Image (cartoon, coloured by chain):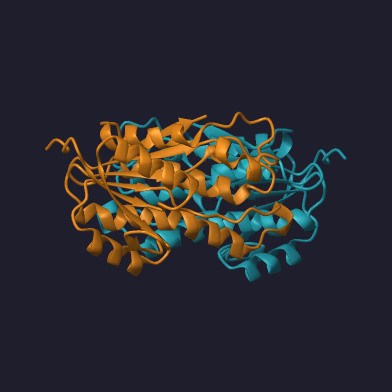
Chain colours: A orange, B cyan
């Protein structure tokens, strides 16, 4: 089954810098975008809560693709890290995004795709970012693994960007020496994942 | 401060195929090995319980190196995976090993090292192994990140082996087409990590 040329995409985490850019990029490609977020979206969702994810899928109906731009992790020096910080990061960006796939797999069509968000800290660590590294590494390895087990011809990829030009006022200090990229380039990687035919890959945007 | 030529090594997960091989390799190099495990060890420990990890460190006293060969994850088809499976894998091999580092960092000497266990599924997925991939990817990225934040000159590495020759009767079917390695080769990578000077690295044994 070939995916339709114009897809209905469920965009999770639509309200952030990245989410808004992905929304724009998908609309410009003619896709129908259903937004899901903690607030100000077509569907309210807390992806760390499996029941909320279930309700989101019920509300969204049939979708051709899930694009996730949501996920939060604590940034804290290793010496101050608590076990709760580690767990909060894993729940906030790994277990939560896996839940989108786990619940999506049996209900979405055979051509559906999942595009998850990770980040450059998988490969380039930063001070106070050990939980971000941990969680991004987890999601990227999961993406490679899930790709060989998804039903039908479902696909899954991760977008792994460096710091955004638009976020340099907040993150510029910690990302000193990194070349920022316009968030539109990361959004374009979502288009590549949604419209393309690749699976199990990490699209680096740096 | 240079590490002593002969180290006192706390070996966590001493009872398994890998743990016993690491024990032998470290003793052959003249190190003093203190074993910790769920049973049949110098110190009883459940590394998924932070209080148990604390008690282990109290009982072990000053050690020069921590070598972990412990960690378990559920193997299950993606289509049968529950949220609890995902969390159990993360607790069993990621949060637990991070706990060894988190609690070790402030109490071990400036030259101490940590050697954690991951596995080839980070880079080569297998059917029913998505949680193993997830967890190994998490630990490997954490190792790279923790390396730049550990106090003093503390070091951290991961050993990431393929399937062991000694485990082919159990795992041979799922690892079809993989070249197994003798477990002694993985144990040797622990020696490299403990005695060497490298940090933030994943020692692939394949």
The residue lying toward the viewer, choosing from B191 and A206, is A206
Picture coordinates of residue A141 (x, y %)? 43, 42
Q: Which residue is drawn at 54% across and 62% down?
A: A88
Q: Which residue lies furthest to the right in this view?
A: B1
Picture coordinates of residue B63 (x, y %)? 77, 53
Quarter of the rendering containing residue A3: top left
The residue lying toward the viewer, choosing from B31 and A172, is A172
Residue B157 appears in the figure: no
Please indicate whether residue B11 sits to the left or right of residue A71 in the image: right
Picture coordinates of residue A73 (x, y %)? 55, 55
Residue B143 appears in the figure: yes
Picture coordinates of residue B204 (x, y %)? 53, 33
Q: Which residue is drawn at 51% across and 40% down?
A: A119
The residue lying toward the viewer, choosing from B79 and B121, is B79
Quarter of the rendering containing residue B85: bottom left
The residue lying toward the viewer, choosing from A112 and B86, is A112
């Amino acid at each position: 089954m070939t995916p339709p040329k114009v897809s209905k995409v469920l965009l999770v985490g639509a309200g952030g810098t990245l989410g808004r850019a992905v929304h724009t990029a998908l609309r410009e490609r003619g896709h129908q975008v259903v937004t899901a977020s903690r607030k100000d979206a077509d569907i309210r969702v807390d992806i760390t809560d499996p029941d909320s994810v279930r309700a989101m899928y019920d509300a969204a109906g049939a979708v051709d693709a899930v694009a996730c731009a949501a996920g939060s992790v604590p940034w804290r020096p290793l010496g101050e890290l608590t076990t709760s910080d580690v767990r909060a990061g894993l729940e906030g960006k790994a277990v939560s995004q896996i839940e989108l796939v786990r619940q999506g797999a049996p209900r979405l069509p055979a051509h559906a795709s999942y595009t998850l968000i990770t980040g450059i800290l998988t490969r380039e660590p930063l001070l106070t970012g050990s939980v971000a590294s941990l969680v991004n590494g987890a999601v990227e390895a999961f993406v490679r693994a899930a790709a060989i087990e998804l039903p039908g011809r479902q696909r899954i990829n991760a977008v792994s960007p460096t710091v955004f030009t638009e976020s340099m006022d907040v993150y510029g200090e910690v990302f000193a020496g990194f070349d920022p990229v316009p968030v539109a380039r990361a959004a374009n990687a979502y288009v590549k994942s949604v419209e393309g035919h690749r699976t199990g890959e990490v699209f680096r945007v740096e």
